[in-house]
Image (cartoon, rainbow, N blue to C red):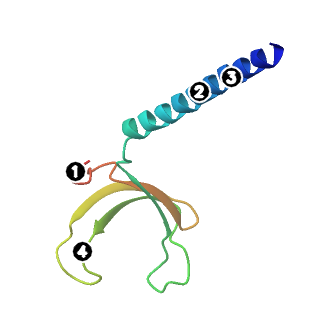
Amino acid sequence: MPFTNNIAIWQARSIVHHCLLAGMFLLLALLQITAQTPTTISYQGLVTDNAGTAPVPDGNYQMTFRLYAAPTGGTPLWEETQPTQILRGLFKTYLGSVTPFAGS
């Protein structure tokens, strides 16, 4: 009889483990469903003088960012202008923070 008892305990533990695994997969699926798509794009760069040899002076600049469908020319699909701080020629910004992207 003790052997039969051990099998019953093992089966009960196995069922509990399977239920826990199923619960974890369900939770992960729910998290995927409720996850939101980011509405901005992190962007950084280096701004130099016209000769391209030295960074522009530190300060705040009005910068215009545009996205195009083609590598050259055409009409922008999206555009925004935002104040951007430049330090040692470097800047970082979040595109879409002023003018949201279509569909966001």
- Give residue 103's mark: 1
Of callouts 2 and 1, which one flags the residue occurring earlier in the amino acid sequence?
A: 2
Instruction: Please state the horizontal and vertical placement of residue 31, each as a whole percent of the image.
Output: 45, 35
Q: Which residue is mark 4?
A: 69
- Please say if 54 is above or below 61: below
Residue that numbered label 2 is attached to: 20
Q: Earlier in the sequence, mark 4 or mark 1?
A: 4
Q: Residue 46 location, x and y as percent?
A: 51, 71
Pair 4/3: label in front: 3
Gap between marks 2 and 1, in whole Å?
Answer: 38 Å
User: Which tag, 2 or 3, sits closer to the chain's start?
Assistant: 3
Q: Are marks 2 and 1 in contact (CB under 8 Å)?
A: no
Say which amino acid is labelled 3. Arg
Q: Residue at x 26, y 51 (%)?
A: 99
Badge 1 amino acid: Gly
Q: Nearer the viewer, residue 70 or 60?
A: 70
- Which mark, residue 13? 3
Image quarter of the N terminus: top right
Neighbours of disc 1 within 10 Å: few (<14), some (14-19), many (20+): few
